Image (cartoon, grey):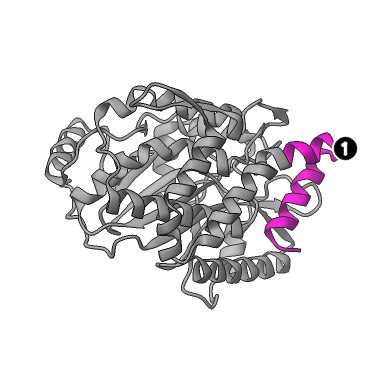
Amino acid sequence: MALETFTTSEALTMGVELELQLVGTLDFDLAPRAQDLLRALDKHSGAWDVKPEITSSMIEIGTSIQREHAPLVAELRDLCRQLSRAARKINVGIAGGGTHPYQHWSDRKIYPTERFRHLSELYGYLAKQFTVFGQHVHIGVPNGDDALWLLHALSRYVPHFIALSASSPFVQGVDTGFHSARLNSVFAFPMSGRAPFVLSWDAFGQYFDKMTSTGVVQSMKDFYWDIRPKPEYGTIELRVCDTPLTVDKAAHLACYLQSIARWLREERPFEPDEDDYLVYTYNRFQACRFGLDGEIVDPKTKQRVKLRDDILRTLARVAEHALDLKSLEAGDAIRALLLAGNDASWLRAAHAGGLPMPAVVEAAAKRWMMA
């Protein structure tokens, strides 16, 4: 299969995708009710989209193309209200969070589509273990060359989004010690991690041809990279975020990414190169393990910096662009998050405060459903 032509897209437009947990309202374990919920949402009013995911205890929702913070928040809140209303009709809860705290992967059921069955046959038990929940953010770019430049320039900021969105401290009833344990599950797949360092769409096409000739991949969907190009949409897609516990936070993260992308495109503060990836895996681990308390290494100066401090400095650098994009409110919310802590800290605090795991999930579902 040949690599498709990169679709021309309006620069800096946004799209948000959220993978969501479906939970029972008695035990708050994952509930295999995706088909029922999709039927209940068949005639929803909205430009947003809802579809199944690989196991039947999860769904994915996607916004329409957005340009500014306020309309994105409005659409996500409308989406949340309609999903919550439909879920209540079938006695199901909906929650954010990157992992369900105590579900067991062996209990999961593969959603009955041809692609999901194929993935289950290919990856075995990993397919069911892939019942983890992420936020993906798409940023529009006008061509493939610009997409690859921005993809690699953004690699330095991947730890920001991991730490800010982290909401998966618990796996199968155990505190993992990680803020984002979800990404450990993603990393188990063979085509995960970072994209190859190429800066032209023609060169990427040559790489794609080599990969498809091996039979390892058949399409762009087979790449699970942290950031990947999406030629059919004309975007790059950031895939490292855990699903937040609220839709407002999902909008804040998307607009923070949009502001960084505009700053990088317009000011070109540096040129990305292969050496940026010398510390990439280490920085990624620091964000997953320690969240906002992590330390990262600057790939140019080789100096260690506190992740919180690096986010604060970046917010200051992009403030003018955030103003132009009408997303200062999102930047203020990110600053507040640095003081209050991420969702992983909230979940840990709820459990440490005496709530058993099912009650923690119930509280998370109430937050997402705005109950």
Relative placement, left or right, of 246 versus 312 is: right
Residue 109 lies, in percent from the top left, at 57, 44
Give the quadrant of residue 275: top left
Decide which of 31, 61 is in the foreground and name it.
Answer: 61
The residues colored magenta run 347-371
Task: Provide the residue designation for mark 1.
Answer: 354
Between residue 104 and residue 114, name the one nearer to us.
104
Residue at 24 percent across and 33 percent down: it is 197
Give me the residue at 46% from left, 27% from top.
283
Which amino acid does the dot numbered 1 rest on?
A: Gly
Apparent side of residue 346 relative to residue 161 in the rendered image (left or right): right
Looking at the image, is 338 positioned above or below residue 82? above
Res 359 seen here = yes
The spot of residue 188 in percent (x, y) is 45, 28
Quarter of the image with the C terminus in it: bottom right
65 above or below 123?
A: below
Q: Secondary structure at mark 1?
A: loop
| Residue drawn at point x = 34 percent, y = 55 percent | 262
**Front residue of this view, candidates 78 and 103:** 78
Instruction: Name the chief secondary structure element in magenta.
Output: helix
Residue 329 is covered by the magenta coloring:
no
Q: Seen in the image, is 265 located left or right of residue 244? A: left
Mark 1: give few (<14), some (14-19) or many (20+) Cα within 10 Å: few
Say which residue appears at 72% left-offset and 42% top-offset.
346
Q: Position of residue 341 (x, y in %)?
A: 67, 41
